[in-house]
């Protein structure tokens, strides 16, 4: 039987399966080969986990846990105590069918420990943002949540009216349908009458919730714009908004999500991070599922970028007009932005001319757009580092 000698800068590896009120730990002392497990309940702290490992294991000790809803706080606290702690991307941990069918905390911790101590580990640690970066991300995500709730309540009201035969059909002088959720539309909704008391109450509540969410969206949008115009993010806003379709909201969503632009090695990894790459790569005949994207990773940026290209069919190859009060970025950033604008417009038109559906072409261009934003963001970050 072959014997292996493991070389690591850590003497002990501790794999943690974290939950809101409990953790399950499995640890391996690489110097002695001793393995132990422990479950801590009642909201254990980082000090509790470190104390358990220190009581028996050789140092230095390495802690790690899977990415999930509990976020980055545990890793920060363990690092504050002077120990290395990584968060492993859950998608990079291989799991057998047995692991999936008989899933429990102990098995999950054991699977993670096996990956961390493998001869050729494939698990990948994720980037941990600073607390300032995370607070900005939370603000932007709160805006996206409120905006999504506002859109949902509007659709619910429209669906309710449609079920009762009430259809908005006001037209402009040129014959085009007027926009909804204007003052005129709200007055029309308020003028709708029902004979049943329950319908009257339902309409009143639907309208009230929709208007409240619209006000919340407006308020959160204003706060996001204040963040975008702050000294920290202003250079990125000036540069990224030179791309057609990218406004301040889209630019700040992308910037705070990226945090550190240099953490990606190439453009394809950026598209993959936001789930904008094809789900399948087959060398044989194509199937009906080949055009689907993975939709993995961060959904906030993916939705924002696709929405930013909603009117790409109207884009031209010309230079984007500089908004009032906006500072022109450096010359090489301006040149790069112009190249990106021309390339994206031509790519969309080419795909549509080849028979691709408009929405499919938009998603394809969105994959290119996040790469363009990453390139320009790297250029800005390098310029800002030079100034310091």
Image: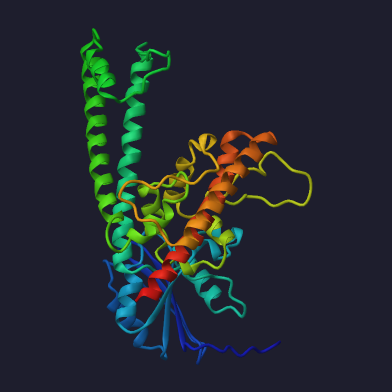
**Residue at 47%, 89% in the rendered image:** 11
From this viewpoint, which residue is outermost toward the right? 284
**Residue at 33%, 69% in the rendered image:** 130
Residue 210 x, y percent position in the rendering = 27, 30
Q: Quadrant of residue 95 in the image? A: bottom right
Q: How many callouts does the rendering have?
A: 0
Instruction: In this rendered view, identify the residue nearer to me: 316 or 122.
Output: 316
Instruction: In this rendered view, identify the residue nearer to me: 64 or 30.
Output: 64
Q: Is residue 29 left or right of residue 153?
A: right
Q: Is residue 281 left or right of residue 195?
A: right
Residue 301 x, y percent position in the rendering = 44, 50
Whether 144 is drawn above or below 51: the answer is above
Whether 50 is drawn above or below 313: the answer is below
Whether 19 is drawn above or below 288: the answer is below
Instruction: In this rendered view, identify the residue nearer to me: 74 or 369.
Output: 369
Q: Is residue 336 left or right of residue 105?
A: right
Q: What quarter of the picture does the C terminus occupy? A: bottom left
Residue 326 x, y percent position in the rendering = 34, 52
Instruction: In this rendered view, identify the residue nearer to me: 1 or 383.
Output: 383
Q: Quadrant of residue 214 in the image? A: top left
Residue 382 x, y percent position in the rendering = 44, 71
The colour mode here is rainbow
**Residue at 32%, 24% in the rendered image:** 157
Q: What quarter of the picture does the N terminus occupy? A: bottom right
Camera sees residue 101: no
**Residue at 52%, 76% in the rendered image:** 116
Camera sees residue 61: yes
Whether 309 is drawn above or below 210: the answer is below
Q: Quadrant of residue 185 in the image? A: top left
């Amino acid at each position: 039987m072959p014997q292996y000698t493991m070389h690591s800068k850590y003497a002990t590896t501790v794999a943690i399966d974290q939950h809101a009120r409990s953790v399950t730990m499995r640890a391996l002392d690489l110097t002695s080969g001793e393995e132990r497990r422990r479950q801590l309940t009642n909201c254990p702290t980082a000090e509790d986990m470190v104390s358990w490992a220190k009581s028996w294991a050789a140092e230095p000790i390495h802690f790690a846990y899977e990415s999930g809803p509990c976020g980055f706080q545990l890793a920060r606290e363990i690092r504050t105590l002077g120990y290395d702690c990584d968060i492993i991307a859950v998608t990079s941990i291989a799991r057998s069918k047995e692991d999936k069918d008989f899933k429990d905390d102990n098995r999950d911790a054991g699977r993670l420990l096996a990956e961390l101590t493998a001869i050729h580990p494939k698990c990948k640690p994720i980037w941990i943002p600073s607390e300032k970066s995370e607070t900005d991300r939370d603000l932007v995500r709160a805006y996206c949540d409120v905006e999504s709730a506002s859109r949902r309540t509007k659709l619910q009201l429209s669906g309710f009216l449609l079920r009762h035969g009430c259809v908005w059909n006001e037209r402009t002088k040129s014959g085009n349908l007027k926009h909804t959720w204007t003052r005129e539309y709200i007055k029309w909704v308020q003028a709708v009458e029902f004979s049943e008391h329950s319908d009257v109450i339902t309409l009143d509540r639907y309208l009230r919730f929709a208007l409240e969410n619209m006000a919340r969206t407006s308020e959160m949008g204003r706060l996001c714009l204040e963040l975008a115009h702050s000294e920290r993010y202003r250079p990125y806003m000036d540069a990224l908004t030179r791309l057609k379709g990218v406004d301040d909201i889209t630019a700040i969503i992308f910037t705070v999500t990226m945090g550190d632009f240099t953490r990606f090695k190439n453009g394809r990894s950026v598209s993959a991070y936001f789930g904008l790459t094809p789900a399948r790569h087959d060398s044989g005949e194509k199937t009906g599922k080949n055009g689907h994207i993975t939709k993995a990773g961060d959904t906030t940026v993916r939705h924002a970028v696709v929405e930013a290209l909603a009117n790409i069919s109207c884009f031209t190859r010309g230079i984007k007009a500089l908004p009032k009060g906006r500072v022109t970025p450096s010359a090489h950033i301006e040149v790069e932005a112009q190249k990106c604008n021309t390339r994206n417009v031509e790519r969309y038109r080419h795909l549509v001319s080849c028979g691709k559906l408009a929405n499919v072409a938009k998603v394809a261009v969105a994959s290119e757009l996040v790469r363009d934003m990453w390139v320009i963001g790297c250029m800005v970050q390098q310029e800002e580092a030079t100034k310091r």
